[in-house]
Image (cartoon, grey):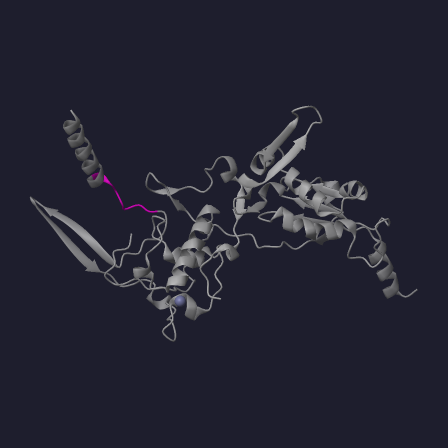
Amino acid sequence: MSLLRKGQQWGTFACVWHIFDATWQDPFRSAHLIKKYLMGLYKPIYHPLNQCGDHVIVINSKEIALRGDQWQKRVYFHHTGYHGGATWTLAWELHSKDPTMIMKKAIYSAMDGTLQRRFTMQRLHIFPDDNVPKEILENVSNQIKQLRPVPNRLHEIPQEERDKIPRLIQYPSDYQLK
Amino acid sequence: MAALYRVLNYLGKNVVLTAQNRNISLSAVTRIKEIIQKKEGNTLTFEAVIKPDPYEGRFLKPKNGACAICSSGLDIKHTDVLILSQFVTSEGNILPRRITGLCETQQKRISSLILMAQYAGLMLRRSPKGGLLHPLQKRKWKKFNSYYDEKTIKARYK
Ligand SMILES: [Zn+2]
């Protein structure tokens, strides 16, 4: 077997570890991206009963961003099974209690509802911040690109950078600007 | 009693207004026309000085008689805070169309984008008590990051 074919063989059958930084990312849109790597959908040997999925590490899940007013409007339902055991938890309440839960539920519900996803979820590692154990981090060989760039806050941008931006408007000369 | 209270309230407000110090501001202040207040003995003189525009060299001239944003051809997002901050005063208020010189659609669009940036905590927002709100001192759902979709802005050219 040639070296190229050997490389292809390893690339196909290797279990790759990916890392994804969730800072300012929408969990429901990035779930569809992470799902592809977690289930191994991008591999030519993919089959639902074939164990070809990769490991994915999600860091900074505390810093996720929801669109619009979804922190107040999105509701998570849970029923204990007892009479009157139904609870409705708002997204911001759930995120204050467990900063990894929204990301986990988003990826779980992005996959098809078979029993296989319970085992697929075991290959997902979510961390609320960037404190990842060393023995997990040393496996990582790929970084998943973020869906949207992390925005800058205006008061954190240095003055030199602000001075380079061209001006779009010119104030009238007799205007007293505050 | 009510009249006395009204007089006291009026006096209190006026005293506060004169004692207000506007020399300190968080962001860069540009005064095209500056009003200087001088007091010599019993006479109080006001003087208006027209100052040169410090941004003259970086001004992007609009072409073909279109407004500044239409002629620049930019697709402005709510995260482009360096552009949006040109349409806001140092107190966080949106400048009116009379000052910005934009067309009606772009003025509405820019106003929505500024509100989005302020609610997302990317730009400082005006506090109802006066001054600016700090973006990190937030409670409940406001302490988490949120972003906005520009497609939800109704004002746009088709
Ligand atoms: Zn225009």
Expressed as whole percent of the image width and height from the top left, the position of residue B7 reads: 15, 31
The reply to whether residue A141 is visible in this rendering is no
Up-down: is A1 above or below A119?
A: below
Q: Nearer the viewer, residue A4 or A152?
A: A152
Expressed as whole percent of the image width and height from the top left, the position of residue B120 reads: 48, 47
The reply to whether residue A156 is visible in this rendering is yes
Q: Nearer the viewer, residue A162 or A167?
A: A167
From which residue to which does the magenta span run?
A: B19-25
Expressed as whole percent of the image width and height from the top left, the position of residue B114 reads: 42, 53
Q: Residue furthest front?
A: A83
Q: Is residue B22 magenta?
A: yes
Question: As drawn, is A34 to the left or to the right of B54?
Answer: right
Ligand 1: which quarter?
bottom left
Q: Nearer the viewer, residue B88 or B46?
A: B88
Up-down: is A57 above or below B113?
A: above
Main SS type for the magenta part?
loop
Q: Residue at x 37, y 57 (%)?
A: B87
Q: Residue at x 64, y 40 (%)?
A: A102
Q: Is residue B114 magenta?
A: no
Q: Residue at x 61, y 32 (%)?
A: A88
Answer with the quarter of the image where residue A8 lies. Answer: bottom right
Q: Quadrant of the N terminus of chain B?
A: top left
Q: Residue furthest bottom?
A: B64
Q: Residue at x 83, y 55 (%)?
A: A46
Question: As drawn, is A159 to the left or to the right of A58?
Answer: left
